């Protein structure tokens, strides 16, 4: 990565309030601070550059606050630790809000700092400082952050930042927010500052389940003839991944995973159900309907998948739900999903059950169940209408083009036919955006690529044209800081998912479906996506129109990324009615 060098920073001393804040970020080990600049935090900006020399942490400039937070989101997913973001007083916070919601729903830690014009109106600068001073800015986002504060002194800021970091990184993780008064930042320190021992403020270690609870779960599972595992939001660790495989194999349990969450189980494993999707597919529904005991490891909408499973009269399976997610459920947001009836609720982080459960089952030396049903497959590809690529073609071509390279898919488009591209490692796929808010794809891909830079993985973000265009300016950050990544835009020149919605409504009302494109198509003029990418500093090429050309184009893109460049491929696709479309048509 290329850092913007600060010059003339020699032996700076800790003098100003904002120096204390910057120092705290360094002591917490924060590597990057993503910003769109603003005068409300000019004090902190100066401290990061001229006190710390723009090193540990390094500033990242983003062209929009929505992307700045999305960059931090993608980074945390790939790095497993938070980045800091600074959001300009009220207006910057407002622009960043959608991405804060995404990070909240995705349980991803972000250390967010904000600012206010001087709280003391007697020293407030005219006009803009007044506009950008609002009381209780935390109220804008309080319903979807772990914690927020507005400290009134540098000493109080130290504690606020410590707590914000600790809260953000405590499972279930999430963003937290500290607003820094402009005056607090810009006043000279009036007394010596004593920094705490950071080791005394680490997030708590994960709790283990009690022996009795593990025994109860083990006896339910050991007594099962057709166990199933729903594997949702779990860790990115390879050790946990291997333990999940071991557990499934011991039990002979069928395993269901989902595209909302990062890769959680090898999709090619004989026990893995139908390819992961954003909605419950028929193959997986049948597995659940057939199961007698279901073990949910961090599956967020357990109630709804089980309801769908038993809607054809199947017997309700006994359920074990391992999750700490309830700690952050609140009355404002429905991200907690429907309340599930559960036979055994185990309040530990999902992966904490693996080792003790395996141990308990081992002692019982159970014989694994033998699932009799053949492995369900993805729905067969439909009749090809033209040589225009489909999403499936992109998946197949990507698999071919990657060769022996390890990739990390930071994002896949809506309707991604996961069956076309296997997940074989927890870092193969990072999961979706959390909040279902279109536009975060570019920023999240940049953040993930930053975290993976220099590793053995190349970062690829695949996304729809609507998704890309919504957050396109986010890619400039990768171009400027030389963060290698490949963006693949699956371009159907439409907000196509919503065309299907309009079609569904028209059908239900017996009205013409031919008008479904109105207010949806991104055409006339089409957005010149390669042009947009080129203007933002990316290498690119002409839109790929023929499926026969995709593999070679992806090969060029991956080779560019391998040599440290940022590349975008625009692929014109045939709209595909994937399983989420089927789902939409029935809801
Ligand atoms: C912020 C926001 N605005 C609007 C929507 C509604 N929405 C859901 S999917 C979608 C279309 C996305 O278009 P694209 O990324 O091109 O994917 P496609 O549906 O064409 O496959 C829209 C607009 C949303 N989820 N979030
Ligand atoms: Mg589209």
Image: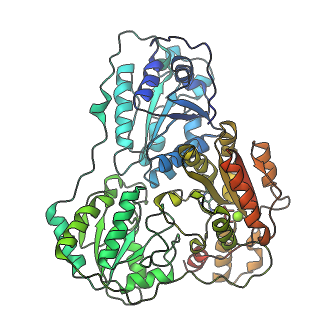
Expressed as whole percent of the image width and height from the top left, the position of residue 155 reads 35, 20
Q: Quadrant of residue 255?
A: bottom left
Expressed as whole percent of the image width and height from the top left, the position of residue 326 reads 32, 57
Expressed as whole percent of the image width and height from the top left, the position of residue 48 reads 53, 23
Residue beneath the point at 56% across and 77% down? 583
> Residue pushed farthest front?
404
- In the rendered image, is residue 86 in sight? no
Residue beneath the point at 58% across and 73% down? 580
- Apparent side of residue 251 relative to residue 30 in the rendered image (left or right): left
Q: Quadrant of the C terminus?
A: bottom right
- In the rendered image, is residue 372 in sight? yes
Q: Nearer the viewer, residue 561 or 77?
A: 561
Residue beneath the point at 41% across and 58% down? 238
Q: Quadrant of residue 50?
A: top right
- Count numbered badges in the picture: 0
In the image, is residue 82 above or below residue 57?
below
- Apparent side of residue 533 relative to residue 343 in the rendered image (left or right): right
Ligand 1, seen in the image, is in the quarter at bottom right
Residue beneath the point at 71% across and 59% down? 489
In the image, is residue 303 above or below residue 61?
below
């Amino acid at each position: 990565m290329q850092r913007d060098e600060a010059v003339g920073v020699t032996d700076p001393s800790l003098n100003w309030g904002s120096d204390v804040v910057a120092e705290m970020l360094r002591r917490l080990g924060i590597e990057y601070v993503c910003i769109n600049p603003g005068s409300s935090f000019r004090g902190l900006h100066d401290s990061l550059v001229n006190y710390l020399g723009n090193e540990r942490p390094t500033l990242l400039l983003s062209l929009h606050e929505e992307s700045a937070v999305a960059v931090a989101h993608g980074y945390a997913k790939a790095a497993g630790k938070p980045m800091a973001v600074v959001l300009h007083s009220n207006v910057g916070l407002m622009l960043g809000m959608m991405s804060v919601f995404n990070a909240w729903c995705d349980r991803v830690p972000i250390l967010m700092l904000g600012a206010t014009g001087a709280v003391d109106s007697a020293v407030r600068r005219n006009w803009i400082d007044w506009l950008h001073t609002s009381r209780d800015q935390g109220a804008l986002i309080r319903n979807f952050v772990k914690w927020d504060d507005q400290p009134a002194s540098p000493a109080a800021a130290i504690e606020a930042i410590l707590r914000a970091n600790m809260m953000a990184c405590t499972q279930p993780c999430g963003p937290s927010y500290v607003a820094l008064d402009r005056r607090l930042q810009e006043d000279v320190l009036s007394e010596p500052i004593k920094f705490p021992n950071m080791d005394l403020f680490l997030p708590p270690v994960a709790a283990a389940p009690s022996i009795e609870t593990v025994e109860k779960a083990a006896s339910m599972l050991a007594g099962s003839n057709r166990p199933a595992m729903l594997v949702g939001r779990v860790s990115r660790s390879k050790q946990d991944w291997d333990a999940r495989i071991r557990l499934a194999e011991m039990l002979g349990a069928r395993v269901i995973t989902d595209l909302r969450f990062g890769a959680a189980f090898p999709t090619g494993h004989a026990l893995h159900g139908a390819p992961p999707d954003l909605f419950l597919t028929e193959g997986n529904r049948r597995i659940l309907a057939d199961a007698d005991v279901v073990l949910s490891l961090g599956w967020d909408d357990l109630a709804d998948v089980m309801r769908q499973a038993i809607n054809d009269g199947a017997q309700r399976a006994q359920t074990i739900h391992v999750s700490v997610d309830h700690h952050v459920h609140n009355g404002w947001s429905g991200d907690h999903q429907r309340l599930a009836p559960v036979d055994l609720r185990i309040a530990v982080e999902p992966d904490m059950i693996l080792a003790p459960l395996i141990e308990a089952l081992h002692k019982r030396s159970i014989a694994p169940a033998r699932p009799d049903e053949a492995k369900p497959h993805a729905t067969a590809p439909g009749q090809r209408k033209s040589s225009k690529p489909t999403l499936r073609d992109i998946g197949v071509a990507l698999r071919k083009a990657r060769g022996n390279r390890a990739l990390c898919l930071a994002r896949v488009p809506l309707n991604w036919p996961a069956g076309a591209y296997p997940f074989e490692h927890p870092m193969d796929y990072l999961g979706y955006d959390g909040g279902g808010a279109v536009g975060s794809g570019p920023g999240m891909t940049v953040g993930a690529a930053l975290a993976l830079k220099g590793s053995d993985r190349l970062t690829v973000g695949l996304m729809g044209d609507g998704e890309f265009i919504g957050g396109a300016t986010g890619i400039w950050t990768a171009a400027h800081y030389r963060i290698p990544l490949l963006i693949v835009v699956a371009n159907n020149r439409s907000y196509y998912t919503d065309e299907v919605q309009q079609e569904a409504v028209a059908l239900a009302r017996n009205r013409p479906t031919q008008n479904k494109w109105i207010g949806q198509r991104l055409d006339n003029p089409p957005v010149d996506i390669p042009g947009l990418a080129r203007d933002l500093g990316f290498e690119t090429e002409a839109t790929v129109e023929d499926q026969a050309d995709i593999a070679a184009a992806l090969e060029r893109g991956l080779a560019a990324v391998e040599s440290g460049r940022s590349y975008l491929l625009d692929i014109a696709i045939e709209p595909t009615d994937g399983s989420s479309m089927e789902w939409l048509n029935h809801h």
